[in-house]
Image (cartoon, rainbow, N blue to C red):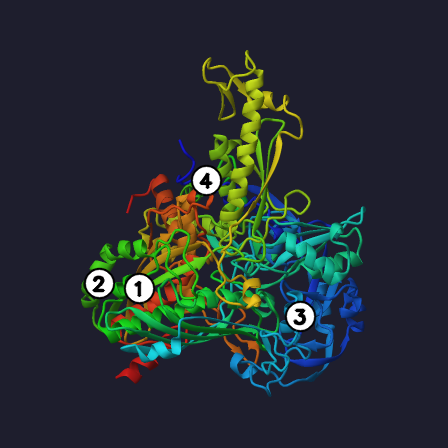
Amino acid sequence: MKISFILNGNDTCIDVAPDKRVIDVLREDLGLTGTKEACGSGECGACTVLSDGETRLSCLMVAAQLQGKNLVTIEGIGSENALHPIQEAFIEHGAVQCGFCTPGMVLSTLALLKTNPSPSREEIREGISGNLCRCTGYQKIVDAISAAAVRMGGQDK
Amino acid sequence: MSNIGRSMPRIDARAKVAGTEKYSVDYYSPNFLWAGVKRAGIPHAVIKGIEVESARKIPGVIDVLTYKDVRGSNRQGVVRKDQPVLADDRVRHCGDALALVIAEDKETINRALEQVVLDYDPLPAVFDPEDALKPDAPLVHEDNRSFFDIMEKLGLKPGSPFVQEDNPEKNLLLKGSLSTGDAKKAFNECNAVVKACFEVPFQEHAYLETEAGWAVLNKEGTLEIVCSTQTPFRDRTEVAEAIGIEQERIRIIAPYCGGAFGGKDGITVQSLLALAALRCPGRPVKMWWNREESFVSSAKRHRARLYYRLGAKPDGRFHALEARIYYDTGPYDHLGGVVMALGLEHSGGPYRIPNTDLKAWSVYTNNPVGGAFRGFGVVQATAAMEQMVDMLAVKLGISPLELRLCNTLKKGDKNPIGVTMTGSTGIEDCLRSLKNTPLWKDRENWKASAGQFKRRGTGIAAVMQGMGYGPVVPDIGNARIELTEDGKFRVYCGVVDMGQGNATTYAQIACEVLNQDISNMELVLPDTSRTLPSGSASASRTTYTFGNAVIGAAEILKERIVNRANELSPDGTGDDMALIPGGVRNVLTGEEISLAEIVVLLDDADRKVTFHFQAPVSNESPSQDPILRLHGVPHVVFSFGAHAACVELDELTGRIEVKKYIAVTDCGRIINPQLFEQQMHGGIAQGIGYALMEELVVEDGVINTRDLATYVIPGAMDIPDMDSVTVDSYEKTGPFGLKGAGEISCNGPLAAIANALADACGVRVFRLPMIPERVLAELHNNK
């Protein structure tokens, strides 16, 4: 099935089985391995992507659902040489350890700060509560998101 | 500015945050084959046959392999090699691998796995470590020779004091016994004695990156394996033996792991991938276990049952301790003997106790495999011992912090197994520092501030963790550093970075010695063809041991560069040259030469340096038992900590929330505070999960919690902001004074939270974790 959508700002047309999971389309067909799979059943948030600006779990989406959508993956947020302020904050504040949850965390943060540019620490915790991390204990992720919010124009809380 | 003691973001953070870091799972190619495993699904059976013909006939299936296709020993393991790559005579737990399917794509794998049928006779099974030690227990290994095999390796024949042929404990993997003084007599001399039995559960590592990798047999006949592992060099030896090819033909490459925590300290996908790749020369084969398979087949933190008795004199001095610890190791030795030995060594905590009687067993059952997990047996022992101390404090009417302070080990003291503390011993400083924190000082206010239907309490725990492999197995690091042709320094990391950030710390250490900026460093990750064997990423040894090797290599390289530069100076004899970032400067004239210019003047051999470091070992022997020494007892360098938790209990639901947490730690001098804090936070979070919510439900050997919806690990709402404080400390044998920090933090939370619960409402939950229904039941019992 031919599916047309916008991927990280570019018009994209792919020919894949309509029931192929989006995470597999991204990783196997499009070479975008920044999106991670850690549970395959919607519990961990590692495969988070943005579809029309909202967080979606790409392990629970099938290719046919991409038609006409504006999809953003971690690769569309910033490159190693031109990182997004959220990514910069994650580095600076030590929010990255093994890094496997990081892409999903960054995308959830982006969606959170869009709806709430000045979240409190509690609101940040709630905002990323769908993204599991086994390494950090979350504290430095919360620190990073607080700092990113300020850097992106939100108020310090 | 010195690089030591300075927070520096990890080098890999940039690629990880951009999504460009390539983990083992991130390799794809149109010519990749996929491999998958048929798991047993039953706990104990005799295998009569494995029917694979119908699976083989499915279009797209390349082959289906069973034990008959394994040419080597078909056994893997670190100490005792008792785990089949593919099960042959018996199934010993539900996760046993029966058949390996190789196919063109993932979908075909799943179809083929459904067609593999096991013909079997069920066997009676054993699921409790104490039951398994009874003479009439079903045998997990019919020919259990582990005890005798190990003794033979040590040159001890049956009949010697440690080798009893008539050992009735047929399912024993290993047992150990350590004692000081005369505990039996000493208990009669105690004025206060407390006694309890604790049950701590299996804990799933739940690393986000499940077990994965890919392998290819290339044209030269070399088998290349890229996989998520903590132990590439040891894996190579194990794979070679198990599948029957020469070690020299295997290359293992270890990218950054997406988490490991001990669960990848040993073989997961490696041998299976090797078998598959050998079958399809030239075709890369990929394997990536899904979460359910990871739950079913991976090793867990050992479930354990701990019987403790602790007695003291009226002034609070500990006088006698007795411990009996049973570790459920499942059917295979995933370092289960070593885990038991370390737990036994730490079973008395960081205290002076003149009379101890400590025994532990690591026992085979048909449960999931118990294995290496951050803390390595010490987590379980600390959970029990630190609750005992609080129970004794109540009995004596002494503050739990003061009771600990009056018993803590100081340098020069003998620890509970009778070994002298010769390294930095900062537990007293940790406790004194904790005593001065607002969290501890305000504990009565915290308790009084609970709202309606809430109770609040504060609890503490004192922790310690030994570093490295102990007295027998050499704990070595082989560092290599080279000055590259473009004037950069390349550090060859021999030990895996599974997310702790040790690769960055190696670069940071080299920067310090070589006086460079971090931007002038390159890292080569572990690769059996490029880096040098340096042991596992485990045992809180990663930075201690390899960091010392890096210092040695960097110092030699620095000397060579400076000497060459001195030879080039006008008089050719001076010592006026100094290494500066990116070059060498004549300190008298200010003249500079870049490293790129220097490197062409160095012989190829001179710009590459290797350095071998071996960690120090204890000269003492707490036991005549050679098995315990082989399994790592005693250690000589320990990290210490004092933890405190403030909890709030909801009396209506039984739910416990951790509201505040502080860890005061002695890990020597800290090289990178940011990376250090990451280790503290992460370990505490795993400990909170272990204390309050993580329960692997296993019934008759079958895991009923096989996903992250039913096995719940802490989310961002479950962990409070934590304070991590360090005490001034310097370990003279450590790199720049450092001691290991990877494990110690996960030892404290369970006991600190349990003690806080007891402080809040006088109740303890002896079967962990402290899930709401158990807490409620205890509250009702207590009424």
The chain letter for the residue carrying disc 3 is B
Q: Secondary structure at mark 4?
A: loop
Query: Circle 1 sits on which residue?
Result: B407
The chain letter for the residue carrying disc 4 is A
Upstream in the sequence, badge 3 or badge 1? 3
Q: Secondary structure at mark 3?
A: helix
* Marks 2/4: CA–CA distance: 43 Å
Q: Is residue A116 above or below residue B182?
A: above
Residue B653 locus on image (x, y percent): 32, 75
Query: Do marks 2 and 4 share a chain?
Result: no
Query: Circle 3 sits on which residue?
Result: B149
Packing grade of label 2 (10 A; few <14, some 14-19, many >=20) is some
Q: Quadrant of the N terminus of chain B?
A: top left
Packing grade of label 1 (10 A; few <14, some 14-19, many >=20) is some
Query: Do marks 4 and 3 share a chain?
Result: no
Query: Do marks 1 and 2 share a chain?
Result: yes
Query: Do marks 4 and 1 share a chain?
Result: no
**B277 or B308, which is in the foreground?**
B308
Residue B301 locus on image (x, y percent): 51, 67
**B320 or B542, which is in the foreground?**
B320
Q: Quadrant of the C terminus of chain B?
A: bottom left
Please name the amino acid that badge 1 sits on.
Answer: Asn
Indicate the quadrant where residue B371 lies: bottom right
* Marks 3/1: CA–CA distance: 40 Å
Residue at left offset 62%, top offset 84%: B138
Q: Is residue A23 visible?
A: yes
Upstream in the sequence, badge 3 or badge 2? 3
Query: Circle 2 sits on which residue?
Result: B443
Asked whether the residues under the numbered discs 1 and 2 touch, taking CB atoms below 8 Å apart as contact, a structural biologist would say no
Please name the amino acid that badge 4 sits on.
Answer: His
